[in-house]
């Protein structure tokens, strides 16, 4: 096969990678907020399930979680829920996994803000909600941006794990050439795609960090 044909096939696989990446962020970022506030709640009814959920997700491999979500419903209920939509199984797993990690980053960012910031808001006559959104929020964003950027870049590379349930993302597409054409270089070629995409994300996050230099605790 020609270089162009292989590149085109890898682009098709990389589109699946980008799709999973984008949808995971879309759903995991807000879900992480809910889990974070649950973990920080004074009520054990909310904090205990949230902390237990985060502990389980952070303590088990993502690949194992993908396998569990895809296969276990079929084993338990004798009905393969995701038989016709493997991508949905992968998306659900990634959203759950990354929401747990994002929640811990959110929690650490919120708790890193000095108590005096909230007290200053009260002195100015602001409610707790107004203080959070007008005084605290941008400082939290400033604090969590570096760890969030690392986690998001990790997400790009973790998408390759979905090949364990036979989804053809970019790595799986390259492995097909190894099996059919007995050529190895397409697998190394995938690194170019990852490097370029992660490079763009790095530049983007560096830009945002410079923009947020004003908000320092």
Image: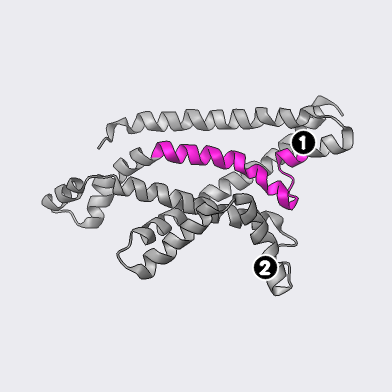
Location of residue 158 in the rendering, given as x and y in whole percent from the top left corner: 61, 43
Q: State the residue at coordinates (57%, 50%).
A: 23
- Please determine whether, in this image, residue 83 is positioned above or below residue 59: below
Q: State the residue at coordinates (48%, 61%).
A: 53
Camera-nearest residue between 26 and 35: 35
What is the secondary structure assignment of the residue under circle 2? helix
The quarter of the picture where residue 38 lies is: bottom left
Q: Is residue 73 magenta?
A: no
Numbered badge on residue 73: 2
Q: Which colour scheme is used?
A: one colour
Residue behind mark 1: 174
Depth check, mark 1 against mark 2: the one in front is 2
The C terminus: image quadrant = top left
- Residue at the outermost front position: 59
Location of residue 116 in the rendering, given as x and y in whole percent from the top left corner: 17, 46
Answer with mark 1 or mark 2, whichever residue precedes in sequence.
2
Q: State the residue at coordinates (47%, 57%).
A: 55
- Residue at the outermost bottom position: 77
The quarter of the picture where residue 77 lies is: bottom right
- Mark 1 residue crowding within 10 angstroms, few (<14) / some (14–19) / many (20+): many
On screen, residue 171 versus residue 25, left or right, reads right
**Gap between marks 1 and 2 measured at Cα:** 30 Å
The N terminus: image quadrant = top right
Q: Give the range drawn in magenta.
A: 145-174
Camera-nearest residue between 9 and 181: 181
Camera-nearest residue between 51 and 32: 51
């Amino acid at each position: 096969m020609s270089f162009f044909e292989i590149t085109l096939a890898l682009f098709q696989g990389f589109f699946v990678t980008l799709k999973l990446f984008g949808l995971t962020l879309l759903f995991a970022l807000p879900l992480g907020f809910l889990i974070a506030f649950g973990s920080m709640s004074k009520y054990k009814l909310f904090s205990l399930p949230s902390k237990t959920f985060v502990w389980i997700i952070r303590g088990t491999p993502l690949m194992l979680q993908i396998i569990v979500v895809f296969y276990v419903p079929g084993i338990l209920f004798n009905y393969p829920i995701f038989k016709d939509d493997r991508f949905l199984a992968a998306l659900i797993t990634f959203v759950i996994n990354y929401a747990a990690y994002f929640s811990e980053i959110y929690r650490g960012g919120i708790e890193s803000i000095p108590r005096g910031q909230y007290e200053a808001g009260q002195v100015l006559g602001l409610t707790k909600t107004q203080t959070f959104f007008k005084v605290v929020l941008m400082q939290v964003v400033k604090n969590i941006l570096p760890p969030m950027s690392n986690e998001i870049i990790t997400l790009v590379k973790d998408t390759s794990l979905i090949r364990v349930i036979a989804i053809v993302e970019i790595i799986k597409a390259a492995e097909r050439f190894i099996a059919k054409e007995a050529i190895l270089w397409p697998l190394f070629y995938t690194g170019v795609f990852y490097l370029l995409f992660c490079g763009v994300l790095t530049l983007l996050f560096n830009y945002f960090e410079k923009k947020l230099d004003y908000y320092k605790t």
